[in-house]
Structure formats: structure tokens, C-alpha cells
Amino acid sequence: MLDLDDLRLIRAVGVSRSLASAAQLLNLTPPAVTIRLQRMEERLRIRLAVRKAKGISLTEEGQRLHQEAVEILERVEALPAHISGEHGEVTGSLRVVAPFGFGRIHVSQIVRKLHLSHPGLEVSLHLSESPLVNAASADVVIHIGELKSSSWVGYPLAPNDRLLCASPAYAKSIKGLNQPADLVNYHCICLRENDEDLPRWRFSLKSDPKRTTVLRVSGKLSANDGTVITDWALAGLGIVERSEWDVAPLLATGKLVRLLPDWNLPPAPVTALLPSRTGMSIRQRIFLETARAFLNPAPWRSRG
């Protein structure tokens, strides 16, 4: 039997890079988190998380429990608003921070729908190259990819894969690209974010996920803006790693082609992050409801 504290524990572990950061999120000591997690695993008779040198990650069973926990806790934490009768027209203010590209294309439409449904709500959408860096006083942050901060509670919105792409012309010039190691023979275009060093592309073989490889990418071209490197790829200047939400329409129309389809890159799910505090406001809840309705199914996977 699991209780709400168990669900809060797995939610915290699921958005943290280490047990220490999960402990900070829960206002507990790391040993206490370790013991509670072990007891949960013993009761359920399954392994929920794997401890690694670089931190902790959820197993497949742990990920399923994390998703269920997030949804259950979201409903529980919204109960006070339902019971107190907070419904109908919603007023007040809501500050949303989102990445530039995804924000322009998708979050702007979510805010539009939210405004049409709740015209009394004042919504401020701030687009940023680094949303978490500019998240001060934000009510909701839209994040794409692995969550590296332990100070936010994540609510899944939509799936999103990373894909390796090039223009048809550049793809025709490629000979002998059968595995990630072969990429060193071709022009790779780098996305460098947050002043990071050489980017790393991490691959796993579809037919054998345990077979993984990491490639340090040191191409002649790099930028800190995804739109720029996509444009360079369209111009035939090299190979890029891009989010599915960004390149799906370009792949569908043949303007880009996918490379190494037998290999997977780490997924980059779309997540709504809320500040670490008890419960959520009705304004945050209706934003999540609107976002999930808009992104289900994911627009980049439902194109004809």
C-alpha cells in the first residue's frame, strides 16, 4: 500500500538528479530519503531507481509510478480549489516562461486558448533562451528535455524525441554512415546552450538499448539558437540533432531527412514546471489543463 508521502517521494526523485537534491525538495535528509525509497521498493517488490556515479535515475517501473504519482497528486492538490468553489471566471495574474522556438509556435497558442476561456485572467508570457535561468517569480516554466534542477515540480505535457537530420542534398553526399562513430567523417552542426563545452550526442541502439555510445561533437559551425542551426541544415551545411517538435513538419515535407534511424537519441519530453511549494493555484491548474488539452495528441505527431 502506498500513501501520499510515498507518491511525493517518487515525484521528487523523478525530477531530481540525485537523492540529495530530492531530499532538499522534500525537506528531508538524504539518508531518510534513501531509507524511505528502499522501504517502498521492498513493499512493491520492484526496483524503482538505479543509483549511478552521476546521480540517480528511475527504472521503467519507477517511471510509470512517477507518472501516476504526478497525476494523482495533481488531482489531490487541486481539491481545495474545487471544494471552496473556485470555478467559473478566473482572475488574477499568471507568469509563464518558455523557450523561444517552442514558445512562439505552441505556448503562445496555449495562452491564446486560455485567454479566450478566462478573459479575466492576466497572463504574461516571457520567452527566453534559458527559461530556468529567467524563472524568478514565474508561476509556470515550460521545459524541454531532462530536468537538471531539483527546485521545481514537473508535470508531463507531451512526448518529444530528438532526431538526427540533414538536407536531402547533404544526405546524398554521405557514404558509409552506419553507426554514430561514423559521424566524425562529416560536418556536424552544434547547438551550444548555457556556455557549455563541446556538446555530446548520446545514442542507444533500438534493437539493443543497452548498447550505447557517446559522441563529442566538434563541428565547424555552432550556435546557441536552434532556429539558426536548423536553417543551416536546410541549406545543406551539415548534420543536426533537433527536437521532434521542431523538425517533424520539415521531415514530413522532405525538406530534411532522418539519419541513423536505427539509433535513438535521449528523449526530450515537454514538461511544465511549478515552483516547489504545497499545492497549486487554480490559475496554474487551468493552465496545465489547457496545455494538456492542446498538446494531446502532440501536434508534431498528429500532422497529416
Image: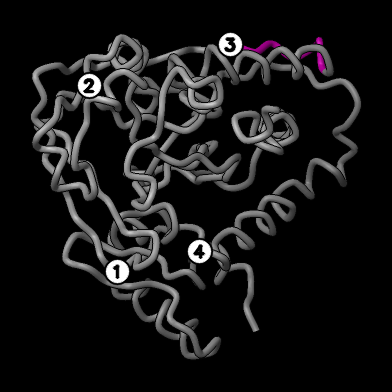
The residue where tag 4 is placed is 63
Q: Nearer the viewer, residue 31 or 185?
A: 185
Residue 127 appears anywhere in the view: yes
Upstream in sequence: badge 3 or badge 2: 3
Q: Residues within 10 Å of mark 3 (few under 14, many from 20)?
A: some
In this rendering, the label closer to the viewer, 1 or 3: 1
Upstream in sequence: badge 4 or badge 3: 4
Question: Regarding mark 4 in the picture, which secondary structure is present there?
Answer: helix
The residue where tag 2 is placed is 238
The answer to whether the residues at label 2 and label 4 have Cβ atoms under 8 Å apart is no
- Disc 4 from disc 3: Cα separation: 32 Å
In this rendering, the label closer to the viewer, 2 or 1: 2
* Mark 1: amino acid: Lys
* Mark 3: amino acid: Ser
Which disc, if any, is residue 210? 1
* Mark 4: amino acid: Gln
Give the magenta-colored segment's residue range. Answer: 118-124
The answer to whether the residues at label 2 and label 1 have Cβ atoms under 8 Å apart is no
From this view, report whether residue 59 is shown above or below residue 269: below
Which disc, if any, is residue 124? 3
- Disc 3 from disc 2: Cα separation: 37 Å
Upstream in sequence: badge 2 or badge 1: 1
